Amino acid sequence: MLAVDIIGVRNHMYDLVGKFLSELPAVQTIQELDDLLKPVLDHYEIQHYICTNMFGFRCLQNRKPMFGTWDSDWVSHYVSNHYYVEDAVITYSLSIREWDTPFYWSDLIAERNLTRGQNRIFDEAWDAGLKEGLVIPLPVSVDDNDMITEFAMVSLAGRKFKKDPVVKGILHLISLQAHRQARRIFLSNWRNQFAPDVFPISPNLPIELLTPRQKEVIQWLAEGKNQHDIATILRISPNTVGNHLAAARDTLQVDNNEELITKLYRHKFLI
Amino acid sequence: MIHVISKHNAHLYPNVLRDMFQLRHKVFVEQRGWNKLAKADGLEKDQFDTDDTVYFLKLDEDFRIRGGMRLVPTTLPTQLGTIFKHYCVLKNPPMDVQRHEWSRYFITDTEYRSPAGYPVHYELFVAILEYCVHRGIEGVSGFIEAGILPRISKMPWEIEYLGPPVEYGGTDGEPVGLGAPLNIEVNKTMLRLTRIAWRVRKPVISLSLGEELTPAREFGFNADVQYQVEDFIRTCPEHVEAIGLFARELQHVDTGSRATVRGILETMTREVTMDGFDNKVSKTPNYVPTSLELQ
C-alpha cells in the first residue's frame, strides 16, 4: 500500500513538472514565469526562491535578481547588512570547479570551515525560517580558456524543505529551464540596456544624469589618477575636478570615491 | 576537418579507428575512472559500437584525433533505451528512424584551434547537425553531463528533457557523476542559428576518404557532397582512388577552377547514384582527369 502511495506521489510530482515544462515556452514576462513557478515551489514547500545574475549577463547589473519569489524581510535584511560580501553560499559557488553540482546549505556548513560571519548568516537565515536550502550554480558561458564569463545562481530555501535526491533533480531541471526562459525574456525586451529593477533594493544607478565631463573625470579616477593628475590631463583646475567628483557622488548617492568606482564597475559603466 | 566514418568508409580508416578506441579507453577509463568500460586490450568498445554507428572525428593536419563523438540510430539498442532507461521518467526515449543518439563525446585538447580558429567542439557539433539535417534526422538524444547543461541552454536549440538531472555511477570504484537525458530537435533553422552563434561559416565536413586518400590540405564540403561520395564508395568501392585524386587536385587549383572540380565531383558521384534511371550514363568514371585538364 505504501509503495503504491509513493508511486502516486511521484507521478503527481512528475505531472507537475511536466505541466511546468510544457507551459514554459509560452511565458512572455517575468511575472508570468513567477506565477508558473509558484505551484511547483508550493508543492515542495519552498518559500524562498531567487535566481540571481552573478555576473556577465548584459541586461542586468551584477548580483541582481532575475526572477523568483522571495522572503522580502530576509532579503532586505541580507542586502542592508551587505551579507553578500561574505556569504559562504556565494563565495563557495564562485570558487568550485565542478560547476554541475548543486549543493545543500547543510552540506556546506558541515564540510567547510566557515568564518564566524558566515556562520552568523546561516544562523540568522535559520531564525528567519529558512532552515535548509539548495544552491544551483548555472555557468551559462565560458570563454576559450574555460573561464566562466557569465554566471547565474539559484538559491532556494524553505521551512520544511529537506534533502531528497529526486527533489534535487527536479529543482535542478526546473531552474535550468526557467533560467533559460528568463534569459530569453530579458534579451528580447532589453537587448542592449539594463532591465528595470524587480526588487527595490540597490536600484540601477541614474548614470544618464552624469554630465560628459563628470564621466571623463571618473574614468581617469578609475585609471588610478589623483585629483591633480586629472587636472593636468584635462587642463582644468584641481578644484574643478573636485567639484565634478562631488557632484557625481551626490547624483549617484555614494559617500566616497571608492564606492563610486565600485558601483560604476558593477553597473558595467567601467570595464 | 571533421571526418564522418560509417561502415561504408571504415575500411579506409583502420589506424584512426583503432586510435579512437584506444583514446576513448584513455579518456573514459583512465582519466574519468569509468572502470566498467575497462578492457584488457585497451580498446574501449561497447555494445553500441556496431556496424550502424557513425563516428565523427576531428582530425588535425597530421591526422591526429583531437575529439570525437558517435551517433547511433535509435531503432537499435541505445544508451537511453537500455542502461539509462530508468532515468527517463518524464518521457520515454525516442525510438524512430529519424532520431539518433549521440554519446562518447570527448576532446583531447581543449586548447587546440583549427586553422580557421575554431575550437574542436564547434566544428564537431556543426558537422553532426549538418549531417543530421541532410540525412533527414529530426532529433538527437543523449545523456548529457550536467556541467554543460547551462551552456546548452544558452544555445538557440529546442531542448526537451526526458528526465531531471540524476546522479549515476558510484559503484565499482567509479566516480559519481551528474547527468540528464535530453532530446534536441534538429532542423535547418537550428543549424543556421548555431552557425551564426559560433561564427562557423565555411563547411566543416571532410570528404572522409581515409588515411591514404584524403589530401594533406583539406577543404570542407557540404554534407550533400559528402553523402554522395559516401554513396559512391558504397556502390563502387574499387574506384575510390578516383575521388581521392580529384580531392587532391583541389589543393592545386585556384578558387575558380576549384568550383569546376567540385562540380565535376558532384556530377560524377551523382551519375552513379542515378545509375539505372538513365542508361546513357556510364556506371563509373573510366578516366581520371589530371590537373592539366582542369585548366
Image (tube, coloured by chain):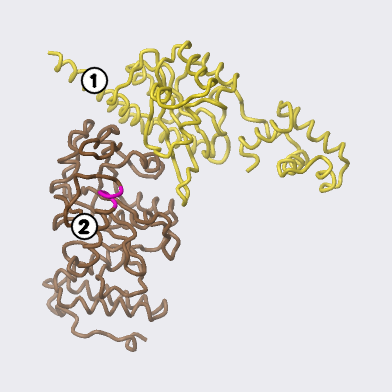
Chain colours: A yellow, B brown
Task: Name which quarter of the figure residue B20 lies in.
Answer: bottom left
Amino acid carrying mark 2 in the image? Val
Q: Position of residue B72 (x, y in %)?
A: 19, 51
Amino acid carrying mark 1 in the image? His
Helix, strand or loop at mark 2: strand
Number of marks: 2
The residue located at (77%, 43%) in the rendering is A225
Going by the image, does A12 lie left or right of B109?
Answer: left
The residue located at (42%, 59%) in the rendering is B118
Q: Which residue is mark 2?
A: B54
Q: Position of residue B239 (x, y in %)?
A: 18, 78
The residue located at (82%, 40%) in the rendering is A227
Cα–Cα gap, marks 2 and 1: 39 Å
Is residue B130 rendered magenta in the image? no
Q: Position of residue A64 (x, y in %)?
A: 54, 29
Going by the image, does A82 lie left or right of A110?
Answer: right
Residue A12 image label? 1
Going by the image, does B172 lie left or right of A207?
Answer: left
